[in-house]
Image (cartoon, grey):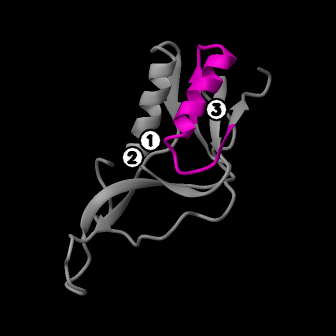
């Protein structure tokens, strides 16, 4: 959840259909997990993926999260009639374009990084791909 937002509720919108032009290379770590399809990734999914990676790596190495859930999604209560305005903010999502590097890892062997990213990809709602930094 962001500390401060300009507007509390925003238009929902969907996944951004364009291919990413920024955040497409591995910048911090040696290995990365790249989104191959666009999607809305919730804060819970990001946290679940982070936990799966750190547990598999046995808390060795370093993990970078390159996406942030800053888009509020609203929801109306169960059995609420039509009308009466927009619902309250329920959760936050990160709008991810195809080609965005979502997570990065450094300080572990390549096999461990592949295993960690495989477990993380099961927690996410987009198709993913393992990528290496140029020159590794």
Q: Is residue 15 above or below residue 51?
A: below
Position above or below: 24 against 30? below
Q: Which residue is mark 3?
A: 32
**Cα separation between marks 3 and 2:** 19 Å
Q: In the displayed structure, would residue 53 be above or below residue 61? A: below
Q: Secondary structure at mark 3?
A: strand
Q: Is residue 132 above or below residue 60?
A: below
52 on left or right of 104: left
Rendered image quadrant of residue 78 = bottom left
The mark found on residue 92 in the picture is: none
Q: Position of residue 9 (x, y in %)?
A: 31, 68
Q: Residues within 10 Å of mark 2 (few under 14, many from 20)?
A: some
Which element type, helix, strand or loop, lies under badge 1? helix
Give the quadrant of the C terminus: top right
Residue 46: assigned label = 1
Name the residue tied to disc 2: 43
10 Å neighbourhood of mark 1: few (<14), some, or many (≥20)? many
Q: Please say if the residues under marks 2 and 1 sit with CB atoms less than 8 Å apart.
A: yes
Of 87 and 65, the residue lying toward us: 87
In magenta stretch: residue 123: yes
Left or right: 55, with 38 as reference point:
left
3 or 2: tag closer to the N-terminus: 3
Cα gap from disc 1 to disc 3, whole angstroms: 14 Å
Q: Along the polypeptide, which appears first: circle 1 or circle 3?
A: 3
Q: Is residue 72 visible?
A: yes
x, y percent for residue 91: 32, 56
How many labels were placed on the picture?
A: 3
**Does the magenta segment cover residue 111?**
yes
């Amino acid at each position: 959840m962001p500390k401060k937002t300009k507007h509390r509720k925003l238009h929902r919108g969907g996944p951004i259909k364009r291919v990413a032009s920024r955040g497409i290379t591995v910048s911090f770590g040696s290995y990365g997990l790249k989104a191959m399809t666009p999607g809305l990734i919730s804060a819970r999914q990001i946290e679940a993926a982070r936990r799966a990676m750190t547990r598999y790596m046995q808390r060795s190495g370093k993990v970078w999260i390159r996406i942030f859930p800053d888009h509020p999604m609203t929801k109306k209560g169960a059995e609420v009639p039509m009308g009466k305005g927009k619902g309250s903010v329920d959760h936050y999502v990160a709008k991810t374009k195809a080609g965005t590097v979502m997570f990065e890892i450094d300080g572990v062997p390549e096999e461990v990084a592949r295993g960690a990213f495989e477990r993380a990809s099961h927690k996410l709602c987009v198709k993913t791909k393992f990528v290496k930094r140029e020159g590794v």
